[in-house]
Image (spheres, rainbow, N blue to C red):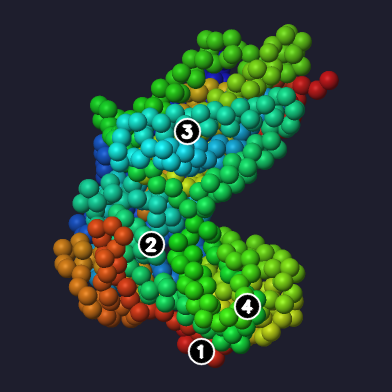
Amino acid sequence: MKAKTKKMLAGTFIATAMLAGTATTLVAQEKPVIATVVKISGIPWFDRMNTGVEAFQQANPDVQASQSGPATADSAQQLQIVQDLIAKGVNALAVVPMDPAVLEGAFKRAMERGIVVVTHEADNQMNTQADVEAFDNAEYGAALNERLAECMGKAGKWTTFVGSLGSRTHMQWVGAGEENAKKYADMQLVDPNNESFDDANATYEKAKEVLRKHPDIKGFQTSAGNDVLGVGRAIDEAGLSGKVCLVGTGLPNPSADLLESGAITAIGFWDPQKAGMAMNAVAKLLVEKKELTDGMDLGVEGYNKVSIKKGAGDGVLVIGNGMVLADKSTYKDHMF
Amino acid sequence: MQRTSGQLAMLAAINILLLIVGAAISGGSFLSIFNLQSMASQLPEIGLLAIGVMLAMCAGNGGIDLSGIALANMSGVLSAVIVSSFLSSGENDLAFSLAFIVVALAIGFSGGLINGILIARLNITPILCTLGTQMAFTGLAVVVSGGRAVMVGSPDLLSRIGNDMLLAVPISFLIFIVVAAVIAAALKYTPYGLWLMLMGTNPKAAIYAGFPKNGVLMATYAISGTLSGLAGVIIAARNVNVKFDYGSSYLLIAILIVVMAGVKPEGGYGRVVCVVLSAVALQLMSSLLNFGGLSNFVRDFAWGLLLLTFLAVGRYDVVGFVFPGNRRRVDTGVKPSSTGT
């Protein structure tokens, strides 16, 4: 019994010692701490955002900026991180909510403790001081659809993909897309709002189903970052590159092959790096108790003249003009 | 009972160690009242689900409850939709809160009972049955809510459960501890507890001994379901909103907690106090990593490491001390009871 307990304790010590060894990064902090929390760590989109947070840190040595995020796509995990950061006592939170509704309670408690809360991609967040948007979501959705309509010759069957039905921005984009398509009487929307869960493989399977069900489909408008890859692969394998149009949110680097082959017509995006910098810039302004004014310059490309609107709650919407639409001929200007 | 005290000592040691490490790397702020409260208020959701899984596992015959978080979300969503259709949270805070809690618990209870009936009466393997009901519950929640978050708001009583403290302890944590204590007492002092454990140890013998097998199974899953309903109430109270896909990672974490607590996957043994301590350990560890600003992938790694340590220890323990014949080793997977004919 004694020996066994010793063995157990030894195991415990090893496990915890490893943790302690790796967790010594925390240093005494005098400077204001701005903590960026993203939806998921380790995917290209938020890795790119991390470069923005690092660039912001370089440019602003008077604050301490860092990024973290859950390992799994679960709003509950993100909530835990936010709660722990509040307890740790950061000065500002810059969050890209997985699900704005789930974070409302935590943000309210954070603001009651005097923590600055800035969000991104969550224009319906009630408890935030400022929500940074790269562009007007309706304009973006309409722009994607306009590009799709142009490719489809303004006629034929088309469908839409969203990350999940609960993803507000995605629903706004496809909603604006549908609205835009009403201009063209010959465009017929079929089986809209397929859920992709931002999983390229699942999207691929689903796109194949759609292609089987509607052999005469002409266009896809997709929303989550990996959707263009899944749908593009399905189109490519079916030998329909160039015949079926695909316009959606995507990143240039992963989409390069499919753009070249013609499976993807065009990708729309905003640079998460710039969004990360803009969020941190706004957070810093608010920590310094400075005013956000209409038309101000955040010192970040695409956010040089932001418009300030009233948000869903007491906070404001900070809207930049960071929309980029790229196709085969132009994507090389934005390699990330 | 050597095994029990060993497991308990180890869990307690881990918790103390994590607190010390936390204090060391954060310069004390890890042990600040606010952080302790913050961690305590994060714990109940997953802790309640883990106790439910433990009960199902103790019932033996491959017992497990995979429907926990799905049922919790469904309870919250359905209850919010039903109650707000005839009461508005703005008008009568207390009535709304009470109605919400009662309806959510009732839905949790019924969902659990459905699991119990399917498993006891129709003899469906628990892992398949609860996997099926998990999808059914999630699906129902999606249909009812249209895939959107449902607003519960912060009516007085609910917001107290979610945010307030009693003697500096979060109320949700107190609820969790009281419920855990009640279940621990029920397992120890009532015939139900004895039946559950003996049935898990040897279902065949239990039947010949005249145990009310179906009744025990249905009660077990119904309790597990009610705990899910309670978890749903606490989620709603803390987050102001409920949504069908909240906490999708909780399913595996709940099982991890239970296995770490030394509950036998093949049934017949489990202690609530170990489950509580094991849940606390996981909470401390994940908060510690967030405090240290470490990647959350390290957390998964650390959890896996802990689990393997426990399993290794548990295995030597069982093999060396209890069953020299090597017949009942502790395994990670769920497998049918080893009491073959």
Tell me the kind of residue under disc 1: Thr
Q: Position of residue A172 (x, y in %)?
A: 46, 67
Q: Which of label 1 and label 2 is nearer to you? A: 2
Q: Which of label 1 and label 3 is nearer to you? A: 3
Q: Residues within 10 Å of mark 4 (few under 14, many from 20)?
A: many
- Specify whether residue B173 is in view: no
- Specify whether residue B272 is in view: yes
Tell me the kind of residue under disc 2: Ala
Q: Which mark is residue A122?
A: 2
Of the pair B313 and A62, the residue shown nearer to us: A62
| Cα separation between marks 4 and 3 | 44 Å
Of the pair B205 and A58, the residue shown nearer to us: B205
SS state under label 4: strand
Instruction: Please say if the residues under marks 2 and 3 sit with CB atoms less than 8 Å apart.
Output: no
Of the pair A114 and A223, the residue shown nearer to us: A223
Of the pair B299 and B66, the residue shown nearer to us: B66
Which residue is tagged 1?
A: A330
Q: Which mark is residue A172?
A: none
Name the residue located 51 percent from the left edge and 15 percent from the top edge. B186
Which residue is tagged 3?
A: B104
- Tag 2 and tag 3 share a subunit: no
